[in-house]
Amino acid sequence: MTMPRTRTVFAQLICCALLFAGRTAAQTRARQFASISEQQAQEPTFRVNVRLVNVFTTVTDSRGAPVANLARNDFRVLEDGVPQTISVFDKESELPLSIVLEVDTSESTRRDIKLEVASAKRFVHSIMRPVDRLSVFQITEDVDQLTRFTSDVKYIDRGIERLSSGSGTSLYDAIFLGADSLVDRQGRKVMVLITDGGDTTSHTDYANALRRAQQAEAIVYSIIVVPVEADAGRNLGGEHALIQISHDTGGKYYYASGLNDLDEAFQQISEELRTQYLLAYYPSRQVSDSPFRRIAVEVTKKDADGQPYEVRHRAGYYTTAAK
């Protein structure tokens, strides 16, 4: 009677040992997979959504005049140095415009505010079509959105007339918040800044402002209001930041020392927005070791004098969606 019971107990012990060994092996494999995953996490790769990448491109000749007679075959598009196939080509794109018009009304620009108001109104009346939308922002120590996005020119005029002076300048905050308002909008997205370039009260910094503008795919035009270009009291650091943001987003910067300069800058911006090319492609590579992909656009054709054209476009795009 004792032997069978002993065998039974012995068999149970063997089963328990086997189960324990199996669990131990499974736990060891789990730790190994976790270790591999951790190593992979330390060496990240970035997968891009296979979506159409829009590149709005401005081409000008040696005199700065827009060039509007180029064909698809005159362009080459590269992403991180790799040639891409242009899937969409459109001249003088009629896509709707979403425009953020941001006006610096800090103490340092007080004497120019009347000129800025008059010129901004003329720009609005010249650029707006029924399909376009524009929102007015005021830049002081705070950033205030004075109008919603609208095509109602009279409503926009009233918003511009509400501009009032403040003590500080939160320029980088304004770029960030203006870009943030453009993130979910469709069509071409444009930001026009009228400022003396100084930043004294922002909570964010240049890098975050630039990143948000690029995430929004906004084209930034900076009109830098200065008494004279060689004025010793100017904020050159702020000016250089505006110049770089304009360059990296495919826009442009202008200096304005009076009403005529403001009007001319607005006129050139309006002409550019009416003569842009849309080049769009599907990225040929889905995986990259960087979250930011650089874009280069080349024009193979020369002008009548054999000189190369100037080409402006955004510097690249982030593979992750803006949040």
Image: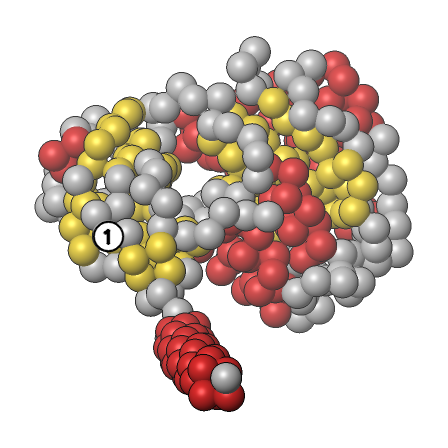
Give, as a three-letter code, the residue at label 1.
Arg
* Relative to 158, 177 lies left or right: left
* Relative to 278, 226 lies left or right: right
* Relative to 43, 191 lies left or right: right
- Corner quadrant of residue 71: top left
Return the x and y of residue 97 as percentages of the image width and height.
51, 26
Asked if 55 appears above or below 320 in the picture, the reply is above
Q: Residue furthest top?
A: 130
- Corner quadrant of residue 303: top left
Residue at 35% x, 55% y: name it: 47
> Viewer-proximal residue, 272 or 135?
135
> Viewer-proximal residue, 1 or 308?
1
Return the x and y of residue 258 as percentages of the image width and height.
65, 43
Label 1 packing within 10 angstroms: few (<14), some (14-19), many (20+): few
Secondary-structure class at tag 1: loop
Visible residue check, residue 311: yes
Asked if 320 appears above or below 266 in the picture, the reply is below
Asked if 165 appears above or below 237 in the picture, the reply is above
> Viewer-proximal residue, 28 or 73?
28
Residue at 76% x, 28% y: name it: 147
Q: Which residue is mark 1?
A: 285
* Relative to 265, 88 lies left or right: left
Total numbered badges shown on the rendered structure: 1
